[in-house]
Image: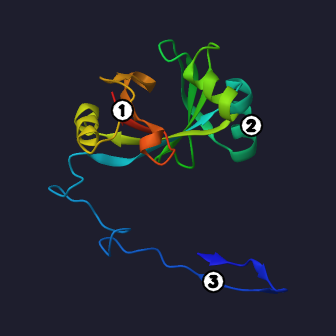
């Protein structure tokens, strides 16, 4: 990565090297049998963004960034209208737009408290219950005793943001 930020009136090129896999804690791979294999994080699933109006947000992301909606639904239990947006060729993680479907929903409360913006980071797991159990064993609190229904019939649970550095972490077991 090259940074061409002007410094003291001139351009300075700074190249940063990404850590190599297995080269220490930042680049370490957590293989089967490692202390983290019981959690079973497979990849980043999506980043959730709270928005007051889903239709307006869909237009904004399409018109300004070229993102396209690949799934849309209303989750009555969660009180949310949601859309999954694909980036680029659509093979990577998604952007999830979350709008309140009713004023007492968690998303409505989030927007009232914090305004629109980043709301969650979600990871794909093979088994949401096993991941939740492993995290509970580490002393982390999860929001639900058992998984709830998520987008497109997935099973989900959340790590309490106070136990995850202020980030709401979602665990997603795809349907």
User: Residue 149 at what x, y percent from top left?
Assistant: 39, 20
Q: Which quadrant is the C terminus positioned in?
A: top left
* 140 relative to 70 in the view: left or right: left
Helix, strand or loop under label 2: helix
Q: Earlier in the sequence, mark 2 or mark 3?
A: 3
| Residue found at x 17% / y 55% | 32
SS class of the residue under badge 3?
A: strand
User: Comparing marks 3 and 1, which lies closer to the viewer?
Assistant: 1
Please name the residue shown 75% across and 44% down the image.
64
Pointer 2 local density, CA inside 10 Å: few below 14, some 14–19, many at least 20: few
The residue to which callout 2 is attached is 60
The picture quadrant where one finds residue 13 is bottom right
- Of the numbered discs in the image, which one, if any, rests on residue 19? none
Asked if the residue at tag 1 contacts the one at tag 3, i.e. Cβ–Cβ closer than 8 Å, the answer is no
Comes first in the chain, label 3 or label 1: 3
Residue at 41% of width from left, 74% of height from top? 19
Mark whose residue sits in front, 2 or 3: 3
Could you tell me how many numbered marks the image carries? 3
* Residue 138 location, quadrant: top left
* Residue wearing tag 1: 142
Query: How far apart are labels 2 and 3 at the CA level?
Result: 34 Å
For label 3, the residue is: 14
């Amino acid at each position: 990565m090259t940074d061409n930020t002007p410094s003291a009136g001139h351009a300075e090129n700074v190249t940063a090297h990404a850590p190599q896999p297995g080269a220490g804690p930042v680049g370490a791979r957590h293989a089967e049998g490692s202390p983290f294999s019981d959690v079973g994080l497979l990849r980043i699933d999506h980043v959730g963004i709270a928005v007051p109006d889903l239709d307006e947000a869909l237009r904004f992301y399409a018109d300004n960034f070229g993102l396209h909606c690949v799934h849309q639904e209303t989750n009555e239990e969660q009180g949310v209208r949601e859309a999954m947006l694909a980036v680029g060729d659509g093979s990577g993680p998604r952007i999830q737009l979350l709008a309140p479907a009713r004023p007492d929903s968690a998303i409505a409360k989030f927007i009232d408290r914090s305004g629109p913006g980043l709301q969650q980071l979600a990871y794909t797991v093979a088994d949401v219950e096993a991941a939740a159990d492993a995290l509970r064993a580490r002393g982390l609190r999860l929001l639900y005793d058992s998984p709830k229904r998520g987008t497109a019939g997935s099973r989900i649970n959340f790590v309490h943001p106070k136990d995850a550095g202020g980030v709401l972490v979602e665990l997603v077991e795809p349907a």
